[in-house]
Amino acid sequence: MDVMVGHEKIRALLLESIHPDAVARLHAAGCLVESVPSALDEDELIERVRDVHLLGVRSKTQVTERVLAAGSQLLGVGAFCIGTDQVDLAAAARAGVAVFNAPFSNTRSVVELALAEIIMLARRVMEKNNAMHAGVWDKAATGSHEVRGRTLGIVGYGNIGTQLSVLAEALGMRVYFYDTADKLALGNAKRCDTLDELLEVAETVTLHVDGRPGNSGFFGEEQFARMRPRSLFLNLSRGFVIDYPALRRHLESGHIAGAAVDVFPKEPKGRGDEFTSELRGLPNVILTPHIGGSTEEAQADIGGFVANKLAQYVSEGNTTLSVNLPTTALPQQPRTRRLAHVHHNTPGVLAQVNSILAEHAVNVEGQLLATRGDYGYLLTDVGVDYPEDVLTRLRAMEQSIRLRVLS
């Protein structure tokens, strides 16, 4: 069934080379889809989003309050990745725009890259590779180590950190982790009460923290100095969480034996653009262009997952796994119209809505309300025949943010 706004087809704009599976899923739902291979800056996006109902981005495009204000018809934003720090979630909620992401789809891809890089750094593969390309045969074992029996410190014990913990232990590594939240240790992993405690024991430190503002710059000179001599360091989380000049100093001094970095504070918008970093040119560093989740398997899974959430939201009003609106999923009754009502979370909203419906002799066939912080989300199934004044009255409520009528 086509998804519509009034008598108009849903228009979707997908940026940053989102997987074709997302395009196919939205096409199947009857959406008009435009795909753009690169990211857009704020001013470019403001111009492109004015007539768009669904917006899909990955990690580089910033969906700011200005963008959301310009997208007056915007219903949903899909972050086709794990993180959502590139989207102003509070501004989206204020505008009644649902935001969805893919919290699990690329976990395995990131974990596999981290494990591969830990082994490559421990074996000094990059240095051996560079020497071979320069025509130098160096078969010495000096400085090369197995990862079995060595200590891995995981900073951030979420979906990625926990799966890395399990697989690293299967390789014979001893695992320690630190997280600001109270997390259950998997397998034989040991929890550290402080980051300093982890840095004292870990021979390899890998970051898997989220993009909350409080994590900006949290790993800098002091933390690098506390790491064990000749240890390894990985960051596959967010570019702004570490001090890159400090990392370079500790790599050049030899205090840190090697590093692998996949994310950077400023990243090029598109393929082929110049990449600049303090870490370029160091022989004991693996640099990758934010590809932790960039496998065909992960991108296909992400594309289908997020597109499906967007399609379900515009057609059914369900907000399962939305990161900014209350989670609501209500099976729709046959021969009904669905009213999807985003509102400010104040006492009496449900009673007021039902009072308006009762005044107009509109029977409620199904109803579900959920709240989340300052916002509430109400799904109400009513008969197909009702006076237009019902919608006018509901939209005029002081608490109303957005009211949609779904077939």
Image (tube, grey):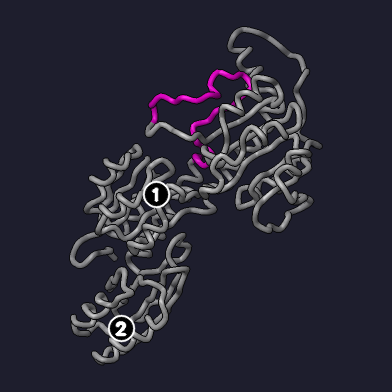
Circle 2 SS class: strand
Q: Which mark is residue 21?
A: 1
Indicate the amino acid at tag 2.
Val
Q: Residue furthest right?
A: 149
Task: Say which residue appears at 42% left-offset and 81% top-offset.
Answer: 347
C-alpha gap between disc 1 and disc 2: 34 Å
Verify whether residue 168 appears in magenta: no
Q: Where, quadrant-wise, is the C terminus in this rendering? A: bottom left
Q: Is residue 284 above or below residue 406?
A: above
Q: Nearer the viewer, mark 1 or mark 2?
A: 2
* Amino acid tagged 1: Asp
* 41 lies left or right of 163: left
Q: Quadrant of residue 319?
A: bottom left
Which badge, 1 or 2, is on the more N-terminal residue?
1
Task: Say left or right for 108 vs 2.
Answer: right
Q: Position of residue 384 (x, y in %)?
A: 25, 82
Residue 40 drawn at (x, y percent): 32, 40
In the picture, the quarter occupied by the N terminus is bottom left
The stretch of residues the image draws in magenta is 271-295
* Main secondary-structure element of the magenta-colored stretch: loop
Residue matched to label 2? 382
* Badge 2: residue crowd in 10 Å (few <14, some 14–19, many ≥20): many
Q: Residue at x 71, y 11 (%)?
A: 138
